[in-house]
Image (tube, rainbow, N blue to C red):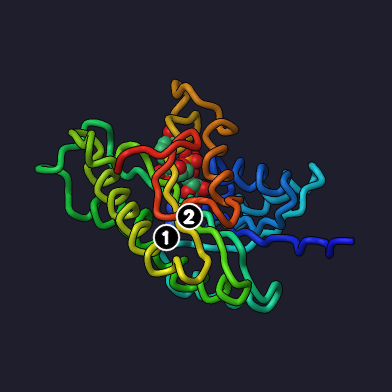
Amino acid sequence: MEAAEVQKIAVVTGANRGLGLEISRQLALRGVRVVMTARDPEKGKQAWEGLRRQGLCVEYLPLDVTVQASVEALARSLAQTFGGLDILVNNAGILPEGQGARALSLGLEVFRQAFETNALGALRLCQALVPLMKKRGGGRIVNVSSGLAQLTTMGTGTPAYRVSKTALNALTRILAAELEAEGIKVNAACPGWVRTDMGGPDAPRSVAEGADTPVWLALLPEDGPTGGFFRDRQPIPW
Ligand SMILES: NC(=O)c1ccc[n+]([C@@H]2O[C@H](COP(=O)([O-])OP(=O)(O)OC[C@H]3O[C@@H](n4cnc5c(N)ncnc54)[C@H](OP(=O)(O)O)[C@@H]3O)[C@@H](O)[C@H]2O)c1
């Protein structure tokens, strides 16, 4: 008889709505114990209760990815409760500028905001939580990026968002290289254009479709890829 598989523990950032909520739901449906995190405790607990009512194994912990103390508190709490971590989905993100924004006229403060959440937020989480993955002998990190980060098709519009997500892609490659020997796979996912508060009502994809590739990357087997950028479970150019 085979030993029962130990339940995997995942952290999802920005889990109170949109793709983060759906990624949490899909991971929990696959038997993962999901720690849903959100910066607003009201909204976070509401989302958590929604999935609990569906019978899913989920927890809630507060987290603002731009606040170092908040990230450290999360790491302490995870260490106390679970002693380790298997999956980190860096989903929290902002698109702080309007569609018509141009790099030459957009305030630098907007670039800083985007960078702080979309790039440094993910790095902060990795720095704090990778030690917990090492305790489990490996892990999976999924950075929710965007096709707007691709250098091959880089153009005008949403410059702060684009630059911050391209930085997130660079971090994906760097961390994948740093962590390969540790059995920790680091990949970036583009969910496509998805109907969320960020994507708007005209986007062609549902949250379920958008969450598919991040969830697939979170559950990659040992022989799965690392250091890649994927949409619809297929590699795409950086
Ligand atoms: N929707 C699309 O078409 C699309 C396309 C490509 C990539 N993406 C990416 O997919 C990810 C999820 O986007 P979405 O469409 O689900 O957007 P969304 O509905 O706007 O949700 C964004 C989530 O991020 C959270 N968040 C923002 N700043 C945070 C912070 N400092 N700390 C913790 N949480 C924070 C938000 O929390 P609050 O509720 O507290 O604001 C919210 O839960 C983002 O990284 C986005 O860039 C989306």
Q: Is residue 203 visible?
A: yes
Q: Position of residue 6 (x, y in %)?
A: 76, 64
**Outermost left residue:** 104
Q: State the residue at coordinates (57%, 51%).
A: 218
Cβ of mark 1 under 8 Å from ligand 1: the answer is no
Q: Position of residue 221 (x, y in %)?
A: 60, 53
| Vertical comparison of 3 with 111: above or below | below
Q: Residue at x 49, y 59 (%)?
A: 185
Instruction: Say whether residue 51 is left or right of residue 105.
Output: right
User: Gap between marks 2 and 1, in whole Å?
Assistant: 6 Å
Q: Amino acid at mark 1?
A: Ala
Could you tell me if the residues under marks 2 and 1 are in contact, i.e. CB atoms within 8 Å?
yes
Q: Amino acid at mark 2?
A: Asn
The C terminus sits in image quarter: top left
Q: Which residue is mark 2?
A: 90
Decide: is 5 above or below 218: below
Q: Residue drawn at (71%, 57%), measured in percent from left and top?
A: 33
The vertical placement of 137 against 106, above or below, is below
Quarter holding residue 198: top left
Which residue is more in the foreground, 82 or 5?
5
Q: Which residue is mark 1?
A: 122
Q: Is residue 74 visible?
A: no
- Ligand 1: does it lie within 8 Å of the C-beta at label 2? yes
Q: Which quarter of the figure is the N terminus placed in?
A: bottom right
User: At numbered mark 1, what does the secondary structure look like: helix, strand or loop?
Assistant: helix
